[in-house]
Image (spheres, rainbow, N blue to C red):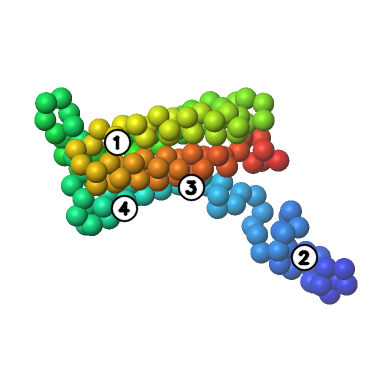
């Protein structure tokens, strides 16, 4: 038995090449191709939008918006499609900003905050006050998930260092 490592073959028990306890050498679960923060933000934004919509409709809100001379019923599929589009668009913009020196975190927060504020004007055209509140809550929650979730994304060089 080796006195410095505590094993008979000279390797350290419970330690990895990087020296951490219980962690495998190399990539972590966050670095795997099937899982990363932007993908989680996209899924989270879509699920958040759907949950808020369903909670609002279960509470009795009839989400309709004025469209031309009539009204348009907002459906859960519309909420999912718009949330997915917004999240994927945000991911693309964030990826472009990551190419800037420093990762563009402040630029991302200012830009996404401005887009969120402008998007809050859309629900003001809802057909009833309950729909206005529900749709603004939709915009705030989905926009908040995208804005704050993608804020923490780091440039690839920072993750591997």
x 65%, y 50%: residue: 26
Task: Write down the residue under mark 2.
Answer: 12
Quadrant of the drawing holding the C terminus: top right
Mark toward the viewer: 1 or 2: 1
SS label for mark 2: loop
SS label for mark 1: helix
Q: Residues within 10 Å of mark 3 (few under 14, many from 20)?
A: few
Q: Is residue 97 visible?
A: yes
x 29%, y 36%: residue: 123
The label shown at residue 35 is 3
The label shown at residue 51 is 4
- Image vertical order of residue 99 relative to residue 45, above or below: above
Q: Earlier in the sequence, mark 1 or mark 2?
A: 2
Q: CA distance from mark 4 to mark 3?
A: 22 Å
The label shown at residue 123 is 1
The label shown at residue 69 is none
Q: CA distance from mark 1 to mark 4?
A: 18 Å
Could you say which is closer to the camera, residue 4 or residue 32? 32
Quadrant of the drawing holding the N terminus: bottom right
x 27%, y 49%: residue: 53
Q: CA distance from mark 1 to mark 2?
A: 61 Å
Q: Earlier in the sequence, mark 4 or mark 3?
A: 3
- Image vertical order of residue 128 relative to residue 105, above or below: below
Q: Is residue 138 visible?
A: no
Q: Toward which corner of the image does residue 136 lie, by quadrant?
A: top left
Q: Earlier in the sequence, mark 4 or mark 2?
A: 2
Mark toward the viewer: 4 or 3: 4
Left or right: where 153 falls relative to 145: right
């Amino acid at each position: 038995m080796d006195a410095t490592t505590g094993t008979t073959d000279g390797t350290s028990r419970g330690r990895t090449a990087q020296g951490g306890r219980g962690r495998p050498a190399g990539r972590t679960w966050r670095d795997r191709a099937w899982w990363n923060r932007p993908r989680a933000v996209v899924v989270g934004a879509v699920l958040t939008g759907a949950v808020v919509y369903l909670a609002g409709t279960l509470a009795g809100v009839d989400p309709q918006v004025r469209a031309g001379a009539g009204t348009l019923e907002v459906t859960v599929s519309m909420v999912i499609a718009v949330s997915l589009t917004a999240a994927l668009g945000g991911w693309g913009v964030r990826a472009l900003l990551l190419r800037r020196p420093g990762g563009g975190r402040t630029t991302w927060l200012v830009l996404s905050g401005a887009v969120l504020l402008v998007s809050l004007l859309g629900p003001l055209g809802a057909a009833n006050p309950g729909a206005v509140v529900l749709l603004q809550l939709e915009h705030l929650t989905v926009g908040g998930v995208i804005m704050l979730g993608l804020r923490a994304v780091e440039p690839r060089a920072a993750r591997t260092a």
